[in-house]
């Protein structure tokens, strides 16, 4: 599913959209047509040039990097997940040349790893666009999604590199949930109550995750941006009234075409860092 068919000009138009005025309507229309969405974890296959600090508990995926709790406490299901992170300064990867756009997304969610029927999630996209003259611009957009439906942009919230974002998703039942994003740097807060898009897309509550993703646009993964470090702090999930952290979480790195693109470190029971390697 490596990106190959979306034109650079189309992605550039998306990257320059701004979260206000008519640009929101235009971006929403593009999402509806192109189908920007998260995909459940896609396991990576083949050989790898794994980084020296890759732990034995690290697995590899084509699209996800971060940490996943793959099972809730006995007799419970996950019903909430949350974290904070700083909006990264995003750039084209060092291996890229010429004009184009490169993106990634940071989010928290329920399900999508061992349970792939649905994901309740919210986060931000970040895109670096290099013009033909060489100048690079950055754009950021907050969104929510109940996979397998496509994602939708939030209106009423803006962000820039260096801002602190707090994000949470909570399910009240397998078919109902709410996601909230707050930019604690400028005081803006948005939320969205959602329903399962179909009777076959209800939550199982089997996974809780904190992810940086190479997301889909149309039917392909977008070119992956260089995002430096994304550190999730205050990372926690709840299940049946119990609050749990990252202890026992599965670490995941992105590997594409045999090359490892990220490095994940769990820093504490409530903090993890996802680093871009290119």
Image (cartoon, rainbow, N blue to C red):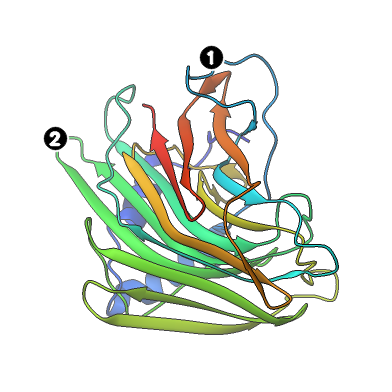
Asked if 38 appears above or below 136 in the picture, the reply is: below
The disc, 1 or 2, on the residue closer to the chain's N-terminal end is: 1
Name the image quarter holding the N terminus: top right
Q: Callout 2: helix, strand or loop? A: loop
In-image side of 266 versus 208 (left or right): left
Asked if 254 appears above or below 121 in the picture, the reply is: above
The residue located at (71%, 58%) in the rendering is 207
The residue located at (66%, 67%) in the rendering is 149
The residue located at (65%, 14%) in the rendering is 47
Task: Give the x, y percent position of residue 249.
Answer: 63, 47
> Residue 275's mark?
none
Q: Nearer the viewer, mark 1 or mark 2?
A: 1
> Residue 133's mark?
2
Name the image quarter holding the C terminus: top left
> Residue 49's mark?
1
Observer-nearest of 208 and 42: 208
In-image side of 208 versus 108 (left or right): right
Q: Callout 1: helix, strand or loop? A: loop
Task: Give the x, y percent position of residue 123.
Answer: 46, 63
Asked if 259 appears above or below 246 in the picture, the reply is: above
Observer-nearest of 243 and 137: 243
Spatial CA distance of label 1 from label 2 is 34 Å
| Res 272 visible | yes
Task: Give the x, y percent position of residue 204.
Answer: 80, 66
Task: Give the x, y percent position of residue 45.
Answer: 70, 24
Does the residue at mark 1 contact the one at mark 2 (Cβ under 8 Å)? Answer: no
The residue located at (40%, 82%) in the rendering is 190
């Amino acid at each position: 599913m490596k990106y190959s068919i979306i034109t650079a000009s189309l992605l550039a138009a998306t990257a320059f959209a701004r979260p206000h005025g008519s640009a929101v309507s235009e971006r929403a229309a593009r999402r509806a047509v192109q189908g920007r969405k998260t995909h459940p974890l896609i396991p990576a296959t083949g050989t790898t040039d794994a980084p020296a600090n890759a732990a034995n508990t690290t697995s590899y995926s084509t699209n996800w990097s971060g940490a996943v709790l793959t099972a809730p406490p006995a007799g419970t299901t996950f019903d909430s997940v949350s974290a904070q992170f700083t909006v990264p300064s995003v750039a084209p990867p060092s291996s890229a040349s010429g004009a184009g756009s490169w993106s990634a997304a940071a989010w928290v969610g329920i399900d999508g790893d061992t349970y792939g029927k649905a994901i309740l999630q919210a986060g931000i996209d970040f895109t670096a666009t290099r013009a033909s003259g060489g100048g690079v611009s950055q754009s950021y957009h907050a969104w929510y999604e109940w996979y397998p439906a496509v994602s939708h942009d939030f209106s009423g919230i803006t962000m820039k590199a260096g801002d602190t974002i707090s994000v949470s998703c909570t399910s009240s039942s397998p078919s109902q949930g709410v996601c909230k994003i707050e930019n604690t740097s400028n005081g803006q807060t948005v939320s969205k109550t959602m329903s399962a898009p179909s009777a076959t897309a209800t939550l199982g509550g089997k996974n809780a995750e904190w992810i940086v993703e190479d997301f889909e646009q149309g039917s392909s993964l977008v070119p992956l941006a260089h995002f430096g470090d994304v550190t999730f702090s205050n990372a926690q999930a709840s299940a049946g009234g119990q609050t749990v952290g990252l202890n026992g979480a599965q670490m995941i790195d992105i590997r594409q075409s045999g090359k490892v693109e990220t490095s994940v470190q769990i820093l504490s029971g409530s903090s993890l860092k996802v680093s871009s390697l290119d």
